[in-house]
Image: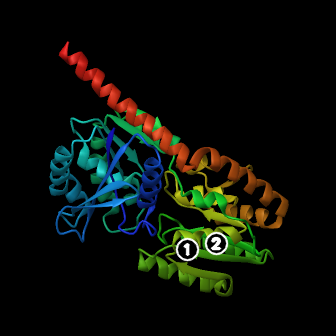
């Protein structure tokens, strides 16, 4: 079966940037281990002057030039036309698009599958950027129009399924994101009372609320330290975070790690007491999956897709992201209870093994490919008769 996976795919697969690239690398590597798929990754790259191909793990990677600097314009305009022409020449049996690339492949005659990693319109509304609400409305119209025209959709969370069910006309499949297998083999060496968070420093990730919560934990007499990993995409917001850290006197307790690679993330998780992510909008954050795979209990928001990942009081705690006192109470509770941390961490690891291991995700994904191709053939045969 010839499969075209249309997605963001890094040139350096050891350093993917962003969740979609991470998922794509993990999924493609796991699918490549199966012996009955002819895999082709089709992606776009700003630095590509013309279409080019390369080989990676037995997979052919096709890199097309970006046609327009604005993502939305490219996805529904010149980039879409280029992608459709290229796929027509490639002639795959099935096309599996991820994220915004789903806009480029909608309406193809070949069976299409789209994995939805996030609701761009929802992320835009809480981005804190100028005209965020207006831009969110535009994205919503474009995104929902694309979802309605996909033959198959992969939902990475029940939260995604709930949002899609009134819109999608195709079949919805439930398959969670895969993470790198190395996360399941990290030995735990907890050091101190450490809160680790890996997220872009931005209003959507709600970094300020986490800082306020850690300040309350320290004020309650817990010898807590905070380690923040992730790039700064909003300098004004990052400045507010730094000012709040200074205001609370958390400077000696806080380490800014910036953007770190997967190896560094695994080292941080190995020594962390807990992982915290108190975002305002998320579908199924890979950072939570990775923490669970290492065996680290998670404190995360009680909204969107996060409650479907963490079982409250079993693998971590769910908190109100708008209430720093609630966040602080659960962080302090975990830091004061070593036995509870270890029990929750072990439960988190078992759950991650069942739900997020790439080998299991690859097999489920291949089944969807087979279903999509078989369904298209039945439809064609019916039309002939």
Residue 281 to residue 247: above or below: above
Q: Is residue 8 left or right of residue 257?
A: left
Residue 274, image x, y percentages: 70, 65
Mark before the other along the chain sequence, 1 or 2 = 1
Residue 371 to residue 70: above or below: above
Residue 65, image x, y percentages: 20, 64
Q: Is residue 370 left or right of residue 138?
A: right
Q: Is residue 130 left or right of residue 81?
A: right
Quarter assignment of residue 330: bottom right
**Which residue is found at the position 54% from the left and 68% from the top?**
262
Disc 2 crowd rating (10 Å Cα; few below 14, some 14-19, many 20+) is many
Distance from the alpha carbon under mark 1 to that under mark 2: 9 Å
Please give the label number shown on residue 340: none
Residue with the mark numbered 2: 268
Residue with the mark numbered 1: 229
**Which residue is found at the position 58% from the left and 73% from the top?**
264
The answer to whether residue 254 of the structure is visible from this angle is yes
CB under 8 Å between callouts 1 and 2?
A: yes
Question: Residue 324 versus residue 341: which sits nearer the camera?
Answer: 341
| Image quarter (top left, top right, bottom left or bottom right) of the C terminus | top left
Q: In terms of secondary structure, where does tag 1 sit?
A: strand
The answer to whether residue 163 of the structure is visible from this angle is no
Quarter assignment of residue 45: bottom left
How many numbered discs sit on the rendered protein?
2
Q: In terms of secondary structure, where does tag 2 sit?
A: helix
**Which residue is found at the position 22% from the left and 38% from the top?**
107
Residue 98, image x, y percentages: 36, 50
Question: Residue 323 versus residue 364: which sits nearer the camera?
Answer: 364
Disc 1 crowd rating (10 Å Cα; few below 14, some 14-19, many 20+) is many
């Amino acid at each position: 079966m010839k499969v075209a996976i249309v997605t963001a795919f890094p040139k350096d697969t050891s350093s993917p940037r962003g969740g979609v690239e991470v998922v794509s690398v993990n999924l493609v590597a796991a699918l490549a281990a199966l012996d009955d798929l002819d895999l082709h990754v089709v992606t776009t790259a700003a630095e590509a002057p013309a279409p080019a191909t390369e080989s990676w793990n037995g997979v052919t990677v096709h890199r097309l030039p970006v046609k327009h600097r604005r993502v939305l314009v490219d996805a529904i305009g010149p980039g879409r036309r280029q992608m459709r022409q290229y796929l027509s020449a490639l002639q795959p049996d099935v096309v599996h698009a991820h994220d915004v690339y789903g806009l480029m492949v909608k309406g193809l005659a070949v069976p299409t599958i789209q994995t939805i990693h996030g609701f761009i319109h929802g992320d835009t509304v809480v981005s804190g950027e100028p005209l965020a609400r207006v831009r969110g409305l535009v994205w919503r119209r474009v995104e929902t129009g694309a979802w309605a025209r996909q033959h198959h959709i992969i939902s990475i969370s029940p939260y995604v399924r709930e949002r899609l069910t009134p819109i999608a006309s195709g079949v919805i499949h439930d398959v969670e994101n895969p993470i790198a297998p190395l996360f399941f083999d990290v030995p735990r060496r907890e050091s101190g009372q450490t809160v680790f968070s890996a997220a872009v420093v931005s209003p959507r990730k709600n970094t300020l609320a986490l800082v306020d919560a850690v300040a309350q934990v320290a004020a309650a007499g817990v010898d807590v330290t905070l380690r923040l990993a992730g790039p700064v995409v909003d300098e004004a917001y990052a400045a507010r975070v730094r000012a709040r850290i200074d205001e609370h006197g958390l400077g000696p307790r806080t380490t800014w790690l910036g953007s770190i690679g997967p190896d560094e993330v695994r080292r941080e998780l190995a020594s962390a007491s807990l992982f915290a992510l108190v975002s305002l909008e998320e579908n199924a954050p890979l950072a939570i999956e990775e923490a669970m795979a290492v065996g680290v209990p998670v404190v995360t928001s009680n909204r969107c897709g996060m409650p479907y990942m963490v079982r409250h009081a079993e693998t971590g705690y769910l908190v109100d992201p708008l209430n720093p006192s609630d966040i602080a109470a659960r962080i302090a509770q975990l830091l004061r209870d070593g036995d509870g941390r270890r029990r929750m961490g072990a439960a988190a690891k078992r759950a991650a093994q069942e739900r997020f291991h790439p080998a299991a995700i690859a097999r489920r994904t291949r089944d969807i490919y087979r279903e999509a191709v078989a369904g298209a053939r039945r439809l064609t045969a019916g039309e002939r008769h």
